[in-house]
Structures are given as structure tokens and as C-alpha cells.
Image: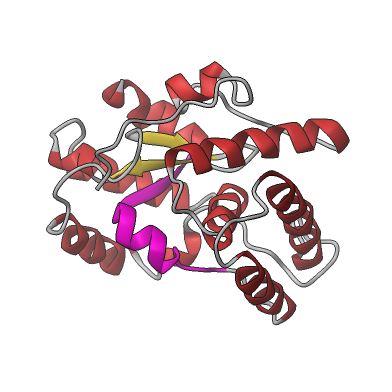
Amino acid sequence: MINRPINLFVSVVSSAIVLMGVAVSFTGCADGENFEKRVSERVVWQMNNYPESRLRDIYKNFFQDRFGPGHMIPDSASAGAYLRSELLKVEGRSQAKLAEVTGWRGDYVRVDLSAIKEGLVSYQVFFEAFMESAQEVRMPQKEKSAEVSAEDWKKEWNRIEKIVKKLYPDIQDFQKDSRFLDSLLNTGKYVVHHSEAYTNEYDPHYRLFSKSVYDNLLRQLLL
């Protein structure tokens, strides 16, 4: 559970992102310097707020931004049961902010489950918004003609990883995680859990919402 002051790296990260968390939405595609700038901002934000992050935690953030929460939802009944079970373990906030944008696009928002425990949003509204977001999920496909092919995602992640390495070459277990992620993507798998270090330090408990669903159903409740 987070209980330390947040170190703001204002010279690199835009103040809107740091101070408002979800106020900025990155949309569309970016190439070259624009892509590197957006990725760099988000990586620096994560490492300032979650310094125990490993490479796989950064990967998870960018993957969630690209593909959302669909891999977590076999059906609504099991998703609801899992959410209620996890809520029993929530003792406080696990995020720097209740709602945080993911990745460089900002297509999805992580909302801390403590929002329910604090009475800011009802379980029913939270769960229905979560399930609505799941309908918008798009996973990597083997076909190159797909909206997001597996090869497209692998290339995008490789670009992101190079930026991470340039910014934070001394992240613990960097090479180990890099090899693991490369092997994972080469076998057509994509989903990872948070690292043990991240889990032990921050005890993450959140759900992902598409930016549109978040704006329509949750944003005003969490301001």
C-alpha cells in the first residue's frame, strides 16, 4: 500500500499528467520523436511513482493500454466473484492516484478498487463499467491484416523497451525480464503478471476501463 510522497519529475513529465493523472488522453498513432516523447513521459511517470517497477511491470502497463482487460474475463459471473473476493483484501489505496492512464496512448485507465471501499462509486456501477469496457478489447492476432497483429505489437514493444533501457538502464532484472518477454512474444503469448517486487511493494488492486467508459461513467465520481 502506497504511503510515501510522490516524487514529481516535472522537467520531463508534463504537469498535466503528474497532477491530474487521467486528464490527458493520448490518441491516434505517433512515430519518431513524438512516439519517443510520449513513451518517455509515461515510463518516467511510472518509475517516479512506482520505483520498484521491473521491466515486466512497464510492459504490463503498455500492454494494458493497447489491449485492455479482456484476457481477465472468462464470463461475467466469474469476473464478479473474483472482484468481490479481491475487495475483501483491499485495505487502502494501492495506486498513487485513484485513476491512472495507461501506456502512451491513454486508451485505458486503471482505477483502484479502493474507490468502491471508500464509497466513491457503487459496486454495481463499477462492475457494469468494467464489463462494458471488456467489450471493446482487441487482442493481438497472428494475421498480419488484423487490426493489431502479433508482429505489430512485438515491434511496438521492442521500440518501447529500447526507450526504457535508455532512460533506466539499471532497472533490476532488466536483462532477465527482457529475455522472458522476448520468449513470451515469440511463442504467441502476451499476458504477464506484475513482478514479485512490484506486488510486494504496492499490493496492486485495480481494474481497467476504456477511456470512453471511464469518462462517461466514472470520471465525475472520482474527482
In the rendering, at what x and y percent does residue 2 appear? 28, 43
Q: Is residue 29 visible?
A: no
Taking depth in this image into account, of 2 and 183 the one nearest to the observer is 2
14 left or right of 3?
A: right
Taking the spot 44% from the left edge, 36% from the top edge, the residue there is 100
**Which residue, as the protein is rendered here, is positioned at the far bottom?**
187
Q: Is residue 141 visible?
A: yes
Taking the spot 81% from the left edge, 66% from the top edge, the residue there is 151
Taking the spot 17% from the left edge, 59% from the top edge, the residue there is 84
In the image, residue 24 sits, relative to residue 137, either above or below, namely above
**Which residue, as the protein is rendered here, is positioned at the far top?**
15
* Residue 161 belongs to magenta span: no
In the rendering, at what x and y percent does residue 201 appear? 32, 55
In the rendering, at what x and y percent does residue 112 appear? 30, 43
In the image, residue 167 sits, relative to residue 189, either above or below, namely above
In the rendering, at what x and y percent does residue 123 appear? 19, 44
Magenta range: 191-210
125 left or right of 37?
A: left
2 left or right of 13?
A: left
* Residue 201 belongs to magenta span: yes
Q: Quadrant of residue 104?
A: top right
**Which residue, as the protein is rendered here, is positioned at the far front?**
170
Q: How is the image coloured?
A: secondary structure
Taking the spot 35% from the left edge, 61% from the top edge, the residue there is 199
Q: How many marks?
A: 0
Taking depth in this image into account, of 25 and 179 the one nearest to the observer is 179
22 left or right of 145?
A: left
